[in-house]
Protein backbone atom coordinates (compact mmCIF):
# COMPACT_ATOMS: atom_id res chain seq x y z
CA UNK A 1 0.00 0.00 0.00
CA UNK A 2 2.77 2.44 0.86
CA UNK A 3 5.04 3.88 -1.80
CA UNK A 4 8.50 3.95 -0.22
CA UNK A 5 9.72 6.54 -2.71
CA UNK A 6 7.38 9.22 -1.36
CA UNK A 7 9.36 11.78 0.65
CA UNK A 8 8.31 12.72 3.22
CA UNK A 9 6.20 9.66 3.98
CA UNK A 10 2.53 10.53 4.15
CA UNK A 11 1.78 9.18 7.62
CA UNK A 12 -1.93 9.14 8.42
CA UNK A 13 -3.41 8.12 11.78
CA UNK A 14 -7.02 6.95 11.58
CA UNK A 15 -8.94 6.62 14.85
CA UNK A 16 -11.94 4.47 13.96
CA UNK A 17 -13.35 1.45 15.80
CA UNK A 18 -15.48 0.08 12.97
CA UNK A 19 -13.48 -2.37 10.86
CA UNK A 20 -15.63 -1.96 7.74
CA UNK A 21 -15.28 1.83 7.70
CA UNK A 22 -11.54 1.59 8.36
CA UNK A 23 -11.24 -0.89 5.50
CA UNK A 24 -13.10 1.48 3.16
CA UNK A 25 -10.64 4.27 3.98
CA UNK A 26 -7.69 1.92 3.50
CA UNK A 27 -8.99 0.89 0.08
CA UNK A 28 -9.67 4.52 -0.88
CA UNK A 29 -6.12 5.60 -0.03
CA UNK A 30 -4.09 2.57 -1.11
CA UNK A 31 -2.82 4.27 -4.28
CA UNK A 32 -2.09 7.64 -2.65
CA UNK A 33 1.33 6.83 -1.18
CA UNK A 34 -0.10 6.81 2.33
CA UNK A 35 1.30 5.05 5.38
CA UNK A 36 -1.98 4.43 7.24
CA UNK A 37 -2.13 3.41 10.89
CA UNK A 38 -5.55 2.46 12.26
CA UNK A 39 -6.37 2.66 15.97
CA UNK A 40 -9.69 1.57 17.43
CA UNK A 41 -9.54 3.79 20.50
CA UNK A 42 -8.03 7.01 21.81
CA UNK A 43 -5.48 5.36 24.08
CA UNK A 44 -3.91 3.47 21.17
CA UNK A 45 -3.91 6.62 19.05
CA UNK A 46 -2.10 8.58 21.76
CA UNK A 47 0.49 5.80 22.00
CA UNK A 48 1.13 6.11 18.25
CA UNK A 49 1.53 9.89 18.52
CA UNK A 50 3.97 9.53 21.41
CA UNK A 51 6.17 7.32 19.23
CA UNK A 52 6.52 9.81 16.40
CA UNK A 53 4.79 12.50 14.35
CA UNK A 54 2.17 11.95 11.67
CA UNK A 55 1.01 14.36 9.00
CA UNK A 56 -2.73 13.83 9.31
CA UNK A 57 -5.05 12.62 12.07
CA UNK A 58 -8.56 11.50 11.09
CA UNK A 59 -10.82 10.66 14.01
CA UNK A 60 -14.36 9.54 14.61
CA UNK A 61 -16.21 11.12 17.53
CA UNK A 62 -18.10 8.07 18.82
CA UNK A 63 -15.47 5.65 20.12
CA UNK A 64 -15.24 3.07 22.93
CA UNK A 65 -13.83 4.49 26.14
CA UNK A 66 -12.52 7.99 25.58
CA UNK A 67 -14.38 9.78 22.80
CA UNK A 68 -13.11 11.68 19.79
CA UNK A 69 -13.90 14.86 21.73
CA UNK A 70 -11.50 13.69 24.44
CA UNK A 71 -8.80 13.17 21.82
CA UNK A 72 -9.41 16.63 20.37
CA UNK A 73 -9.13 18.20 23.82
CA UNK A 74 -5.94 16.30 24.57
CA UNK A 75 -4.34 17.39 21.30
CA UNK A 76 -5.48 20.96 21.88
CA UNK A 77 -3.96 21.03 25.37
CA UNK A 78 -0.76 19.26 24.26
CA UNK A 79 0.01 20.61 20.77
CA UNK A 80 3.40 18.87 20.79
CA UNK A 81 1.54 15.57 20.33
CA UNK A 82 -0.09 16.83 17.14
CA UNK A 83 3.22 18.38 16.02
CA UNK A 84 1.60 20.45 13.27
CA UNK A 85 -0.43 17.61 11.77
CA UNK A 86 -3.81 18.36 10.23
CA UNK A 87 -6.74 17.21 12.38
CA UNK A 88 -9.87 15.95 10.62
CA UNK A 89 -13.17 14.91 12.21
CA UNK A 90 -14.79 12.00 10.35
CA UNK A 91 -18.23 11.44 11.77
CA UNK A 92 -21.91 11.13 10.92
CA UNK A 93 -24.48 13.64 12.11
CA UNK A 94 -22.14 16.55 12.91
CA UNK A 95 -24.80 19.12 13.76
CA UNK A 96 -24.45 22.73 14.91
CA UNK A 97 -24.11 21.74 18.57
CA UNK A 98 -21.25 19.37 17.78
CA UNK A 99 -19.57 21.94 15.58
CA UNK A 100 -19.80 24.49 18.40
CA UNK A 101 -18.22 21.99 20.79
CA UNK A 102 -15.32 21.57 18.36
CA UNK A 103 -14.86 25.25 17.62
CA UNK A 104 -11.48 26.69 18.51
CA UNK A 105 -9.91 23.26 18.89
CA UNK A 106 -7.68 23.31 15.84
CA UNK A 107 -9.93 21.26 13.56
CA UNK A 108 -8.75 21.54 9.97
CA UNK A 109 -11.73 19.85 8.34
CA UNK A 110 -14.93 17.96 9.06
CA UNK A 111 -15.76 15.04 6.79
CA UNK A 112 -19.26 13.69 7.18
CA UNK A 113 -19.88 9.97 7.00
CA UNK A 114 -20.33 8.40 4.57
CA UNK A 115 -17.65 10.10 2.50
CA UNK A 116 -16.76 9.11 -1.04
CA UNK A 117 -13.42 7.81 -2.25
CA UNK A 118 -12.90 11.14 -4.04
CA UNK A 119 -13.57 13.17 -0.87
CA UNK A 120 -11.13 11.10 1.17
CA UNK A 121 -8.43 11.29 -1.49
CA UNK A 122 -8.88 15.05 -1.89
CA UNK A 123 -8.65 15.55 1.87
CA UNK A 124 -5.36 13.65 2.09
CA UNK A 125 -3.84 15.31 -0.96
CA UNK A 126 -4.69 18.80 0.30
CA UNK A 127 -3.43 18.03 3.80
CA UNK A 128 -0.01 16.99 2.55
CA UNK A 129 0.15 19.70 -0.09
CA UNK A 130 0.13 22.28 2.70
CA UNK A 131 -2.91 24.11 1.39
CA UNK A 132 -4.95 26.31 3.65
CA UNK A 133 -8.12 24.72 4.88
CA UNK A 134 -10.81 24.65 2.23
CA UNK A 135 -14.55 24.35 2.78
CA UNK A 136 -15.55 20.74 3.35
CA UNK A 137 -16.89 18.90 0.31
CA UNK A 138 -20.64 19.01 -0.12
CA UNK A 139 -22.55 16.22 1.56
CA UNK A 140 -23.42 13.30 -0.70
CA UNK A 141 -27.17 13.26 -1.41
CA UNK A 142 -29.23 10.60 0.30
CA UNK A 143 -29.57 7.38 -1.67
CA UNK A 144 -32.79 6.95 -3.69
CA UNK A 145 -35.37 4.52 -2.41
CA UNK A 146 -35.49 2.43 -5.61
CA UNK A 147 -33.76 -0.83 -4.59
CA UNK A 148 -33.05 -1.82 -8.18
CA UNK A 149 -30.72 1.14 -8.66
CA UNK A 150 -29.48 1.67 -5.10
CA UNK A 151 -26.19 -0.23 -5.43
CA UNK A 152 -25.35 1.27 -8.82
CA UNK A 153 -26.02 4.72 -7.38
CA UNK A 154 -23.73 3.90 -4.45
CA UNK A 155 -20.99 2.92 -6.89
CA UNK A 156 -21.22 6.37 -8.47
CA UNK A 157 -21.66 8.32 -5.23
CA UNK A 158 -19.00 6.72 -3.05
CA UNK A 159 -16.68 4.67 -5.28
CA UNK A 160 -16.13 7.03 -8.19
CA UNK A 161 -17.93 4.66 -10.55
CA UNK A 162 -15.48 1.82 -9.82
CA UNK A 163 -17.76 -1.22 -9.63
CA UNK A 164 -14.82 -3.53 -8.94
CA UNK A 165 -13.82 -1.54 -5.88
CA UNK A 166 -17.44 -1.58 -4.70
CA UNK A 167 -17.69 -5.36 -5.07
CA UNK A 168 -14.40 -5.89 -3.24
CA UNK A 169 -15.57 -3.68 -0.39
CA UNK A 170 -18.99 -5.35 -0.22
CA UNK A 171 -17.35 -8.79 -0.02
CA UNK A 172 -15.17 -7.66 2.89
CA UNK A 173 -18.19 -6.15 4.64
CA UNK A 174 -20.13 -9.41 4.38
CA UNK A 175 -17.29 -11.18 6.17
CA UNK A 176 -17.08 -8.43 8.81
CA UNK A 177 -20.84 -8.56 9.46
CA UNK A 178 -20.45 -11.93 11.17
CA UNK A 179 -18.16 -10.29 13.73
CA UNK A 180 -20.54 -7.33 14.05
CA UNK A 181 -23.47 -9.61 14.80
CA UNK A 182 -21.46 -11.38 17.48
CA UNK A 183 -20.52 -8.01 18.98
CA UNK A 184 -24.16 -6.89 18.97
CA UNK A 185 -25.31 -10.10 20.63
CA UNK A 186 -22.62 -9.72 23.30
CA UNK A 187 -23.61 -6.11 23.94
CA UNK A 188 -27.22 -7.10 24.52
CA UNK A 189 -26.30 -10.01 26.80
CA UNK A 190 -24.18 -7.71 28.97
CA UNK A 191 -26.65 -4.82 28.85
CA UNK A 192 -24.08 -2.55 27.23
CA UNK A 193 -26.38 -0.28 25.26
CA UNK A 194 -23.55 2.20 24.65
CA UNK A 195 -21.68 -0.47 22.69
CA UNK A 196 -24.83 -1.33 20.76
CA UNK A 197 -25.32 2.36 20.00
CA UNK A 198 -21.78 2.67 18.62
CA UNK A 199 -22.21 -0.48 16.53
CA UNK A 200 -25.51 0.58 15.00
CA UNK A 201 -24.11 4.07 14.37
CA UNK A 202 -21.25 2.55 12.37
CA UNK A 203 -23.46 0.05 10.57
CA UNK A 204 -25.74 2.84 9.39
CA UNK A 205 -22.77 4.43 7.60
CA UNK A 206 -21.62 1.13 6.11
CA UNK A 207 -25.12 0.32 4.84
CA UNK A 208 -25.48 3.73 3.24
CA UNK A 209 -22.09 3.32 1.54
CA UNK A 210 -23.34 0.01 0.11
CA UNK A 211 -26.59 1.59 -1.05
CA UNK A 212 -28.69 -0.37 1.45
CA UNK A 213 -30.92 2.55 2.42
CA UNK A 214 -33.63 0.56 4.22
CA UNK A 215 -31.09 -1.27 6.37
CA UNK A 216 -29.40 2.05 7.09
CA UNK A 217 -32.67 3.50 8.39
CA UNK A 218 -33.19 0.44 10.58
CA UNK A 219 -29.71 0.86 12.03
CA UNK A 220 -30.36 4.55 12.76
CA UNK A 221 -33.57 3.61 14.56
CA UNK A 222 -31.68 1.08 16.65
CA UNK A 223 -29.04 3.70 17.43
CA UNK A 224 -31.73 6.07 18.73
CA UNK A 225 -33.33 3.37 20.89
CA UNK A 226 -29.99 2.36 22.39
CA UNK A 227 -29.07 6.00 23.03
CA UNK A 228 -32.40 6.43 24.86
CA UNK A 229 -31.59 3.46 27.09
CA UNK A 230 -34.60 1.41 25.95
CA UNK A 231 -33.23 -2.11 26.38
CA UNK A 232 -36.41 -3.93 25.39
CA UNK A 233 -37.02 -2.00 22.19
CA UNK A 234 -33.32 -2.16 21.34
CA UNK A 235 -33.34 -5.95 21.63
CA UNK A 236 -36.33 -6.20 19.28
CA UNK A 237 -34.81 -3.78 16.76
CA UNK A 238 -31.47 -5.60 16.85
CA UNK A 239 -33.13 -8.99 16.31
CA UNK A 240 -35.05 -7.64 13.30
CA UNK A 241 -31.97 -6.02 11.75
CA UNK A 242 -29.83 -9.08 12.39
CA UNK A 243 -32.33 -11.54 10.89
CA UNK A 244 -32.86 -9.43 7.77
CA UNK A 245 -29.18 -9.21 6.98
CA UNK A 246 -28.22 -12.75 7.90
CA UNK A 247 -31.22 -14.02 5.96
Image (cartoon, rainbow, N blue to C red):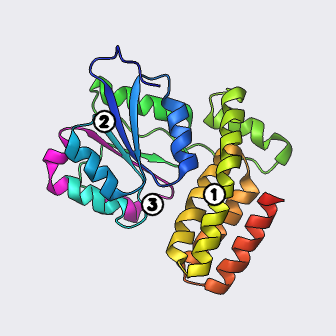
* Residue 133 tag number: 2
Question: Which residue was labeled with disc 3?
Answer: 95
Image height check: is 160 above or below 220? above
Q: CA distance from mark 2 to mark 3?
A: 20 Å
Q: Earlier in the sequence, mark 1 or mark 3?
A: 3
Indicate which label's residue lies in the foreground, 1 or 2: 1
Label 2 element class = loop
User: Within the magenta stretch, is there residue 80?
Assistant: yes
**In the shown orientation, is residue 233 left or right of residue 54?**
right
Q: Which mark is drawn over residue 179?
A: 1
The 10 Å Cα crowd at callout 1, few under 14, some 14 to 19, many 20 or more, is few
Could you tell me residue 87's position as x and y percent? 30, 44
> Which span of residues is magenta-colored?
76-102
Instruction: Quarter of the image for the C terminus: give it.
Output: bottom right
Residue 117 picture quarter: top right
Give yes or no for residue 85 being in the magenta stretch.
yes
Residue 162 screen position, x and y as percent:
67, 26
At horizontal 55% and vertical 41% (from top left) the residue drawn is 23
Q: Position of residue 157 (x, y in %)?
A: 64, 36
Amino acid sequence: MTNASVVPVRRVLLVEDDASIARFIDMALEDEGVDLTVCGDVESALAVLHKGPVGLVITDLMLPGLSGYDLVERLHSEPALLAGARLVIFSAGVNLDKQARLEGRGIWRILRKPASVAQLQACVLEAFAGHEAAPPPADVPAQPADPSSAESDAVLAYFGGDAGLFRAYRAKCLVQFEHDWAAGDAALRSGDLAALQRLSHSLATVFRTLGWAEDGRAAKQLEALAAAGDAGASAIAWAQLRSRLLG
